[in-house]
Amino acid sequence: MTAVNLATGRIRPRDREAVIQSLRAGVVPRIGQQHIQVGRADEVAALLGDINRIADGGSAVRLVIGEYGAGKSFFLNLVRSIALERKLVTVHADLSPHRRLYATGGQARGLYAELMRNLSTRAKPEGGAMPSVVERFIAAGLDEARSRRVEPETVIRERLAELRELVGGYDFAEVIAAYWQAHDTGREQLRSDVVRWLRAEFSTRTDSRKALGVRTIIDDRSFYDHLKLLARFLRLAGFSGLLVCLDEMVNLYKMSHTRARNSNYEQVLRILNDCLQGSATGLGFVFGGTPDMLLDTRRGLYSYPALQSRLAENSFKRPGLVDLSGPVMRLANLSPEDMYVLLAKLRHVFAGGDPDAYLVPDEALTAFMTHCAARVGDAYFRTPRTTIKEFVDLLSVLDQNPGVEWSDLIDRVEIEAETNPDLLPPSSGAGPPQPDREAAPHDDDLVHFRL
Ligand SMILES: Nc1ncnc2c1ncn2[C@@H]1O[C@H](COP(=O)(O)OP(=O)(O)O)[C@@H](O)[C@H]1O
Ligand SMILES: [Mg+2]
């Protein structure tokens, strides 16, 4: 394998820590992904096009489809950080039995609330940005009021006027106006009630009316309408738009009640139609899911005829070829070459971007891969989470124990094949939790290294 050229220049300690800690915990990094990203140049370019379209006041939607371990969640996070750079606001959540696109028992409100907790801006990439976003809207209104020499309230109401025409927009505008009053009169309780309302944390209309004088709340039925409203509001506040990232779509596929599942698919269809036809403004969606979730004609998205015809055009007509023209984007598994580059990048990040501080030479990267292939077979790069984690652990041990030889450690890495937790029979649906087949063997892996 050839040497990998990596950009020199230091890596911020904050990024370094975030990347190392996430990978050791077996989750994808929230920040600093760009330092370890491999491949996906075409896919990133396509999403960049989507992001630009959203920022121009248009809309976009993609379904990122890949096998377990292909890198869907990593890719979604990467897209999210690009969107933040482009002044979009992002929200993200994993679907689960408690978080759905459509529900009657609070699960769609639950999803909305989770999205709002994760609301991020460039200045607050790790979520919790709702109050600062509303503040920014108010500040923009105050600026305009000053320059036009009119009352701030007048300007703020004018700016909110366009929201009033949208479904649910009247009350949304009232809530934002209440924030202005809270701001103006220093009423902290009112201010925090507004933020709670926007985050869908009111569960009854009565509470909402008492706190804010508004008779509606964000509930299961208004999930999507409120995302559209939020996108419009964000543009009024000076952001470019809203990107919604929904991962683990397999949870819809796993739902055992056909009617409930279909109602969720109907929401997907509604979003797809809106965003493909451009009738949403400054709003985009990226869904992450497995091939089964899409293709299974019994319970996947393809089981819903209108979705199948919408999505089938481009999806798998030409296996092996990339087609980025339609909403379905197939993520191929990482290749062994990608894995090599990834290990080189990990070594680079670990060294804080300084090649003189590399803990292992190139031979170690190849030796590590050979070792994993011997233990696990080729699956080691198709389900890379464990491989990556073990490699980062190995670097940590070397880092903390100068004088120890990498070659003595590699043979002791006890890597095992990963099990895809989604391979439960779909009929188990949201039933009782299954024993976690993944957790046990890897928890104590540092033990193998202990010297
Ligand atoms: N393009 C990539 N560049 C670098 N690392 C990646 C890339 N894609 C995936 N990974 C890493 O591979 C592992 C599996 O990716 P993940 O996104 O969790 O897969 P999925 O969500 O498809 O199951 C994670 O550790 C992730 O950090
Ligand atoms: Mg994932």
Image (cartoon, rainbow, N blue to C red):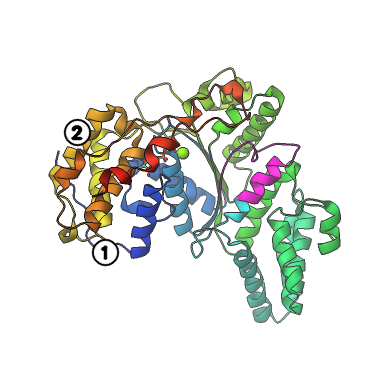
Q: Can you say whether 321 is above or below 248 in the image?
A: above
Disc 2 crowd, CA 10 A, few/some/many (<14, 14-19, 20+): some
Mark 1 / mark 2, whichever is N-terminal: 1
Q: Can you say whether 292 is above or below 278 in the image?
A: above
Please state the horizontal and vertical placement of residue 11, each as a whole percent of the image.
30, 62
> Please, what is the three-letter code of the amino acid marked with disc 1?
Arg
> Please, what is the three-letter code of the amino acid marked with disc 2?
Thr
Image quadrant where residue 146 sits = bottom right
Image quadrant where residue 138 sits = bottom right
Q: Residue at (32%, 35%) from the top-left corner?
A: 334
Q: Which residues are magenta?
A: 92-114
Q: Secondary structure at mark 2?
A: helix
The residue closer to the viewer here, 272 or 147, is 272
Left or right: where does residue 230 sit relative to residue 25? right
> Is residue 397 in sight in this rendering?
yes
* Quadrant in which ligand 1 is drawn: top left
Q: Check residue 105 for magenta coloring.
A: yes
The residue closer to the viewer here, 126 or 405, is 405
Q: Quadrant of the N terminus?
A: top left
> Which residue extends farthest top?
298
Beta carbon of the mark 1 residue lies under 8 A of ligand 1 = no
**Residue beneath disc 2:** 370
Q: Residue at (64%, 69%) from the top-left corner?
A: 135
Beta carbon of the mark 2 residue lies under 8 A of ligand 1 = no
Residue 10, numbered circle: 1
